[in-house]
Image: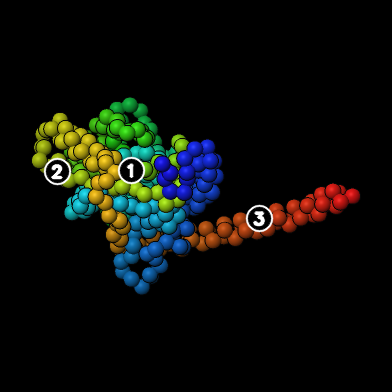
Amino acid sequence: MAHGTTPDGILGKVIGLVSLFAVLPVFSLSMPLSFMFGSPSCWGFGEKYRPSFSYVWSKFMTETVMGCRLKLVGTRALYKDGPCVYLSNHRAWADFFIDMYLTEGRAFILSRFAVAYVFPAFMLPAMWVGAVFAFKRGKAGAHEELNNALDAHFKTFTDFSGFVVYPEGTRNTRPKSLPLKRGLIKYTHSRSMDVQIIIGGHKEHVLSEQRASASWGVEIPVGYSEIISSKAFVGDFEGFYAEVKRAWELEWDRVHGEKDRPTRPYHPKVQLVEYTNGMSVLLVASSALCFVAGIAAVIWCVTLAAAAMPLGVALGAARGA
């Protein structure tokens, strides 16, 4: 079955690879591009509250660039009445913007620091505003150091009330879930935070380095679980973990279940935040740099085309002779 603009078979693999190479430059500059062309706009300097960078960026990538069509499975919606850890399924690169959009930009994403070396124009602004918590793989058992760093992140970036965790620990595009890792679920329990599970299907068809493919217009079925409160399991992590596991499996089966399940179009609501002076400076500076980079790219392409014209004329003359 085709997903989005990429058909099945060998032709689909070729189209998917070409699409991936076409979208990667956009993805690498997606944060400043979303400032310039995203909707709703970040540029209302006279307004006290404006759309959060994380919401504008994630919506720009999900709906504008990749044309994803979100379909809500069931009637449950995003929990936003207190600190919450959102457990999501990890399938591809597309997870990062789709899952942030599904949390309305209220949750930051955990990412390995190495990604900043690959996509600095996206990662550095995202880290600056707290939308990405970049970590380095440390020595075994360094859980408390990571937990303390997460606590500090929450205190520094108060616009975020939660973060997205991929509890399977790795990408998984199989029909069945992998066992859930305990590390950050233990963090959630120790900090008395709530948990909501958000499962999205077909995300690997949107933008995937593993499949070496990208596609526009993929339909993404999305399901939100009931809330699991760690306060109901004080001193009982095993009971809390078992309840999280039960809810995860139910939501997984609900989203990946029968094709005739009831769904409706879904557009996450905008989150408004108060902009700091630093955010305004970042908005202007990154947009200006992106504009300059775009002009430089156009000049470079025109220069290459102009340089190639004499060679083309010479080859044409040689053939005529």
Report the amino acid beneath label 3. Cys
Which three-letter amino acid code belongs to the residue tagged 2? Ser
**Foreground pick, 149 / 167:** 167
x, y (%) of residue 85?
24, 44
Nearest-to-viewer mark from 1 and 3:
1
| Residue 121 seen in the figure | no
Is residue 38 visible to us here? yes
Quick one: 2 or 67, which is closer to the camera?
Answer: 2
Tell whether label 1 touches label 2 (CB within 8 Å): no
N-term-proximal mark, 2 vs 1: 1
Q: Residue at 26% of width from left, 41% of height from top?
A: 258
Q: Quadrant of residue 237?
A: top left
Residue bearing mark 2: 229
Disc assigned to residue 301: 3
Residue at mark 2 to residue at mark 3: CA–CA distance: 56 Å
Say which residue label 1 marks. Answer: 201
Q: Is residue 110 above or below residue 172?
A: below
Under tag 2, what secondary structure? strand
Q: Please identify the quadrant where the N terminus is shown.
A: top left
Whether 67 is drawn above or below 211: the answer is below
Q: Earlier in the sequence, mark 2 or mark 3?
A: 2
